[in-house]
Amino acid sequence: MIEMTAAETQEQPTATSGAAWTDPDPSPVVTDSEERVHAEPAVPPFRYRVDPFHRTKDKVAIVGFTDHRKLAFKLGDDFELWGLNELYQYEDVSRFHRWFEIHPRDDFEKDDAGKKHLADMGKLDLPIYMHQHFGDIPASMPFPKKELEVALGSDYFTSTPAWMIGMALAMDFREIHIYGVDMAQDSEYVGQRPCCEYWLGRAEGAGVRIYRPPVSDLLSAIGQYGFENGSAFSAKVQERLRYLHGRDNVILAALRELEAKKESVDVEYKARKDSLFAERMQMVGAIQDCNFWNRSWAVSAAADAASAVPDRSADPQTGIGKAAA
């Protein structure tokens, strides 16, 4: 276990006082099987609300953006709460102990929303772990990336929550809760979820108690491979997908037929097209919803939908190409 001693005082510290990550010797130190994570001491003096270098509790709750994040605020005072990115726009930041913003600063210099985010962080008084200290964000401090990689023996981190779990493990928290983090959508999360689950497994294997709400998609699946493959749930989703794809094909065929007649029936064309298009968007949304549940919960898809999916290459949104001249 990587040992990072808990703070012995609740007094407001400065970034230069008693830093467990700071050591005159820049090389990792191993004594009695205990390893310490070292952070560079080049952090300007700032009166943080909590100690930036030591854990102040034995338990930590990592809080993300999805709805079940609200459960974190029902925890007792024996938890540190860690937030990230722009979460302060939705929750009371005074309830948190540490903040993480490890995206490159340049990403926020491109538009007004990003610049506002930087300005808002400049008003915070809890440790904000970033690429480096920034003068206009007094509470910012360097995130100990290299130190964590050495201490944990891995550079496999594909998301901020994964880094946060790794840091909680390095700081020797005895219990890690994770709320508001699902990573179940079709986006960057597809590659991020396995890493997050890996670090939860690493922590649990190290003897740390792990908790995520039953509604969380992390570490969850319906059925067990080899024993419940092709479960009733998967079969039901596939049945629903077959119906939706079939109905979608009918609507799309009607849209294409209407498209061919539009010059002679402009008024009818518009009314009918709007109606069909709205109905088709419902089908597309329902299909996406079923695919979401299938990927998030099923062990494996039983089979592709039976109904053939029409060629939508002409127009990614409607599947309708331009009428022939």
Image (cartoon, helix red, strand yellow):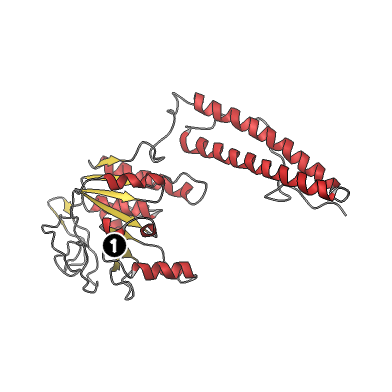
- Left or right: 130 with respect to 280? left
**Which one is in front, 237 or 31?**
237
| Residue 279, quarter of picture | top right
- Under tag 1, what secondary structure? loop
Total labels: the figure holds: 1
Residue placed at 47% from the left, 38% from the top? Answer: 296
Residue placed at 30% from the left, 52% from the top? Answer: 166
Label 1: few (<14), some (14–19) or many (≥20) C-alpha neighbours in 10 Å: some
Quadrant containing the C terminus in the rendered view: bottom right
Residue 241 in the image: state x and y as whole percent.
61, 33
- Left or right: 148 with respect to 300? left
- Left or right: 24 with respect to 189? left
* Location of mark 1 (residue): 144
Residue 317 in the image: state x and y as whole percent.
67, 49
Residue 9 in the image: state x and y as whole percent.
11, 59
Is residue 226 placed above or below 94 in the rendered structure?
above
Badge 1 amino acid: Pro
**Which one is in front, 55 or 80?**
80
Residue placed at 16% from the left, 52% from the top? Answer: 34
Is residue 113 placed above or below 215 in the rendered structure?
below
Is residue 141 placed above or below 307 in the rendered structure?
below
| Residue 151, quarter of picture | bottom left
Residue placed at 36% from the left, 52% from the top? Answer: 161
**Which one is in front, 112 or 102?**
112
Look at the image and tell me whether residue 179 can be seen: no
Look at the image and tell me whether residue 83 can be seen: yes
- Residue at the limit of the structure toward the bottom, as seen here: 135
- Left or right: 232 with respect to 28? right
Residue 175 in the image: state x and y as whole percent.
23, 44
| Residue 10, quarter of picture | bottom left
